[in-house]
Amino acid sequence: MMKTRHFLLLLVCTAIGFTACKKNSKDNFDASAQFTTDTTAIRAFVVANKIPAVKDAKSGIFYQIITPGTGSVSYSGSTKVTVNYTGKLLNGTIFDTTAGTAVTFPLGGLIQGWQIGIPLIQPGGRIRLIIPSGLGYGNGGGGLPANSVLDFTIDVINAQ
């Protein structure tokens, strides 16, 4: 009886040990490989939809300045931007929109893709940003599928 208890205890401890050592799929995430996958998907999307987007060589976002806007705002993380926007996945699914009701955010509190893209235009401008997942919500977050490439059209109403 005592040997059976020890054996069961050993078996339970071993199972717990193996479970604790199991790596989470996020631990095995390869950001570089995902960036390559995202860039390939974005290029195909841009070509298929005839979007005259430019790739920012430093960050990897693709953007199309639809209207540059006017002014000379020097953006920083504390700059408050008032915007209207629509965010879609590459399959066209709208996942977020202001629906014409402007909202204000500090630029530094937004996803990296916005922090990189919004300063490319001035108030009154409109930009389309196609953002690799690593500069968006990454490997999970924002209520979207992991590694989602994001397609935003943003109107900058004001920046100060």
Image (cartoon, helix red, strand yellow):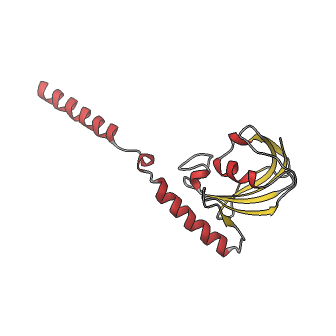
Q: Quadrant of residue 51?
A: bottom right
In-front residue for pair 140/52: 52
Q: Quadrant of residue 11?
A: top left
In-front residue for pair 50/4: 50
In-front residue for pair 139/17: 139
Residue 34 image point, x, y percent: 50, 58
Left or right: 30 in relation to 83: left
Residue 57 image point, x, y percent: 61, 61
Residue 20 image point, x, y percent: 34, 37
The residue at the point 82 percent across, 47 percent down is 73
The residue at the point 25 percent across, 32 percent down is 13
Residue 121 image point, x, y percent: 79, 55
Tell me the quadrant of the picture where the N terminus can be found: top left
Residue 96 at least partly seen: no
The residue at the point 80 percent across, 41 percent down is 104
Left or right: 97 in relation to 11: right
Q: Would you place residue 22 above or below residue 88 in this image?
A: above
Residue 58 at least partly seen: yes
Tell me the quadrant of the picture where the C terminus can be found: top right
The residue at the point 80 percent across, 64 percent down is 66
Name of the residue lying farthest toward the top: 2
